[in-house]
Structures are given as structure tokens and as C-alpha cells.
Image (tube, helix red, strand yellow):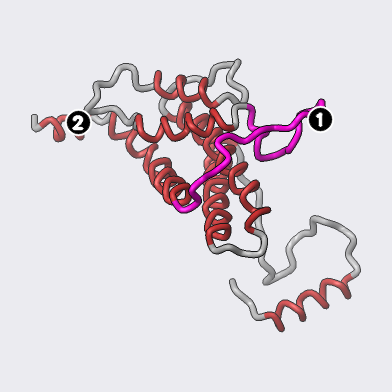
Amino acid sequence: MSISEDEELTLYQAYLNSCDPRLIKSTDEGAPSVEFTFDGEWREYRIWEGYLDASLILLKKVLEQSPWSENLIFPALFKLRHAIEVALKWHIRYAGGAIPKRAGHDLFILIDAFRRTADDLDDDASYISAHMLNCISELAVVNPRSITFRYSTELDGSSIEISPEDWNLRHLYFMVSDLSVFLDDLSNRIDLSRNEEYQAYLRGD
């Protein structure tokens, strides 16, 4: 809920007057709060959705040429990369597949594992989008170990290069937006791919 600057100043003064040194505090009655009462698949789903939403919000801020745009691009792309990794892992399991033990942060291994979950489906029933997986592969090339947008140097001090150096921000924002829509609907598409009645309807049987 949005509040005015005066209201925020009043709340900040109350915070200062409380003299509470803790970072994490239990909720006061009527105050905004968050509860971490769920785990497992529910939490993992919210993690990748949240990171993807945060990436879009930050990319939009960068597009608006805010004073912090040159700083925000790095968390925007880190959150995008992490969202895709967790989303692939979540959908691999949702589709009945298994995450290879050697996968780690390797998007190429995860892409391959995700493709294999649809090996028994024909092209008409498949939920695999070659276009979207190709876009994810592009990011995997730029950021193979999930460190490119987190650090500027390797442990030995050598520079972490970003290639290509020139990115079209508006195109990137629209692509990430499309990717978000695709991932949001992917579990539904996986369900429909195994639904014989729906597939028979598509075939006109």
C-alpha cells in the first residue's frame, strides 16, 4: 500500500523511537508483514516467479533512465538468470523428470533435462518451445556459471568479461516479459500435454 512522504516520515520517526536493534522483528498489529510458513514446491514456485517479476521491475526502471539505471542492470540480469535456473528445475520436476546431479547452475544441462521430459510426446502435444529455450541458451552463453552479473572479477582477480557488450534494452525487456508469460503458463501446458481428452479434441477425434 502506497503512503505519502509525510506518513513515511512519521513511521520512520516511530521506528527510531523504538530503539529496536534487530534486523528481523515480529509483526506489530496492523503493520505490513510477510510469513514464511510454506516450503517445498510452493516456496520454489514463488522464488522463481518473484525473481522474474523483480527482474522485469528493475529492467523497466533501467528503461526509464532512472538515476540508478547503470547500477540496476546488474541485479536485473542476475535475478533473470536465477529465475530461469530455478524455473527450469521446478518444471523438470513438475513434468516428471529428474534434475541431473551434475547440473548445479548449468543452464545447458537443465535445458537438455527439460527437453527430455517431453521425449514421449509428438510435436503437436509437446510443451517445448524451441524459441524460448534458444533465448535461455543465449543467456547461458553470456553467464555460464551464474557469476557474470554478481561479480566483476574472478577469484584470481582477472576480469569477468560480458559479451556482447552492447544490449538493446527495450528488446531485452520485451523478451523477458514474453518469457515470463511463457513460464507462467508452462505448468498448464504440461498438464494439457498429458490430457488425452484435450489432445483428442485438438486432433479432431
As drawn, which residue projects farthest toward the bottom? 6
How far from the left and from the top, in percent, is residue 18?
Answer: 87, 71
Q: Amino acid at mark 1?
A: Gly
As drawn, which residue projects farthest toward the left? 205
Residue 151 among magenta residues: yes
**Residue 199: quadrant of the picture:** top left
How far from the left and from the top, in percent, is residue 165?
Answer: 58, 40
Q: Residue at x 44, y 49 (%)?
A: 171
Please name the residue that numbered disc 1 is placed on: 157
Residue 188 sits above or below residue 69 on the image: above
Left or right: where 45 falls relative to 16: left
Q: Residue at x 55, y 17 (%)?
A: 100
The N terminus - image quarter? bottom right
> Over which residues does the magenta segment extend?
145-170
Please name the residue that numbered disc 2 is placed on: 199
The C terminus - image quarter? top left
Residue 97 sits above or below residue 66 on the image: above
Question: Is label 1 or label 2 in front?
Answer: 1
Secondary structure type for disc 1 = loop
Magenta: main secondary structure? loop
Left or right: where 182 falls relative to 85: left
Q: Residue at x 50, y 36 (%)?
A: 87
State the residue in front, 127 or 195.
127
State the residue in front, 23 or 182.
182
- Tell me, yes or no, whether the two marked residues, 1 and 2, touch with CB atoms within 8 Å: no
Label 2 crowding class (10 Å Cα cut-off): few <14, some 14-19, many 20+? some
Secondary structure type for disc 2 = helix
Left or right: where 153 falls relative to 127: right
How far from the left and from the top, in percent, is residue 94?
Answer: 44, 30
